[in-house]
Amino acid sequence: TIADHQISCDFCDNNTILKYAREFEIDGIACTGTDVVVPTIGRVIDELNLHGTGFESAIACSDKWLMKRALRKHGVMTARGFACESPDDLEAATASLGFPLMCKAVDSSGSQGVIRVDRPDDLHEAWKKSSEASSSGRVVLEQFLEGLEFGAQAIVAGDNVEAIFLHNDQLAPPPDYTPVGHSIPSCLDLEQQSRSKAEVIAAIKALGIRDTVANVDLMLVEDAPFIIEIGARMGATCLPETISIHGGFNAYDCVLSLALGESVRLPEPLQGTPNASRLIESPRNGIIREILVPEMVRSHPNLHRLSIYARPGDRVRRFRVGPDRIGDVIVTGASALEAEQLVAKLASMIKIDFAESAE
């Protein structure tokens, strides 16, 4: 670790975090890759008058229902939805939305508690699973959007959007739809990119996001970009590395500079190196005996990073949601498509030897 001080506590415990923030007289506070700590950060920002997204906006960014209400109030393109706090609310919501629809825990992350529902018979079970994945037990039903899912990382200094990096998303097959990889540059045409960036800016303004790198999930429906979700923090699943390689800068340094109120200087012109990332997934539940990485993977000239999080003896789960990942691979290429194909091939060559039979 390079930290001067380490505190062991629940980072959702904003009273404890605020206590230590005062004690250490911090100059800034930030996170990346998770939504659950964003409200805590917002409270510290408000109480200590720091740079960043304040508590009210942080809460709205961390609650899918509050987020949807704010987006629709400001005319941002997003799916219609209904809050369903009990099974009694389901009938009225489905009468308006129809099927298929999306059933989501309002305050989960990593795609946990997000379920596509195709038939009325499956709705109550989906609602139950989403409710269990929510710390508040609340669920939102959403209109199902059919199209191309993609994303963006937006650099926000003060309330000004300095840059937007659109990226391609690779998803797990249904019913999970969990992001398993990303690539850049975007495959959208220039008009689609322009319209997407305009919606991202509108969403950031609608939610009051400030001084951070915002993570945005979008869906291109025909030629219209819809905001699925937006967070007041930088994305996970190798997205900081994806935009860093492409832009020729360090995205983590950027997040820290924004939290300290410092100016962010991006290279001009941007480097524009195509690259792609891919999660390493377990095909089933079990205990790892060994992770086998061929030399061809380790020594490939286009390999930028190979990270293995799991270790022999660890119990792992078949990949369904983001926290199930056991590692990642990042490569560069002549194009985003070439990099996508290469990273998928290299990731598929990494095998797990299990110490026990399937569960």
Image (spheres, rainbow, N blue to C red):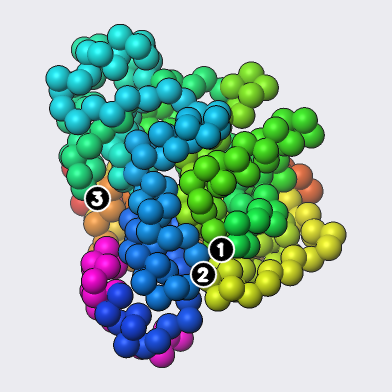
Q: Amino acid at mark 2?
A: His
Estimate the x, y position of residue 260 in percent, counting from the top left.
55, 76
Estimate the x, y position of residue 186 in percent, counting from the top left.
70, 40
Which disc is residue 51 wearing? 2
Does residue 103 show up magenta in the picture? no
Which disc is residue 29 wearing? none
At a point 79% along the width and 34% down the height, the residue shown is 190
Query: Does 271 appear above or below 149?
Result: below
Q: Which residue is identified by label 1?
A: 211
**Does dot 3 land on a helix, a strand or a loop?**
strand
At a point 30% along the width and 14% down the height, the residue shown is 94
Q: Are marks 2 and 1 in contact (CB under 8 Å)?
A: yes
At a point 26% along the width and 33% down the height, the residue shown is 139
Q: Which residue is identified by label 3?
A: 286
Left or right placement of residue 34 versus residue 217 in this view: left
**Does dot 2 land on a helix, a strand or a loop?**
loop
- Residues shaded magenta: 1-17
Q: Earlier in the sequence, mark 2 or mark 1?
A: 2
Occupied quadrant, residue 116: top left
Question: Mark 2 and mark 1: span between their CA atoms?
Answer: 6 Å
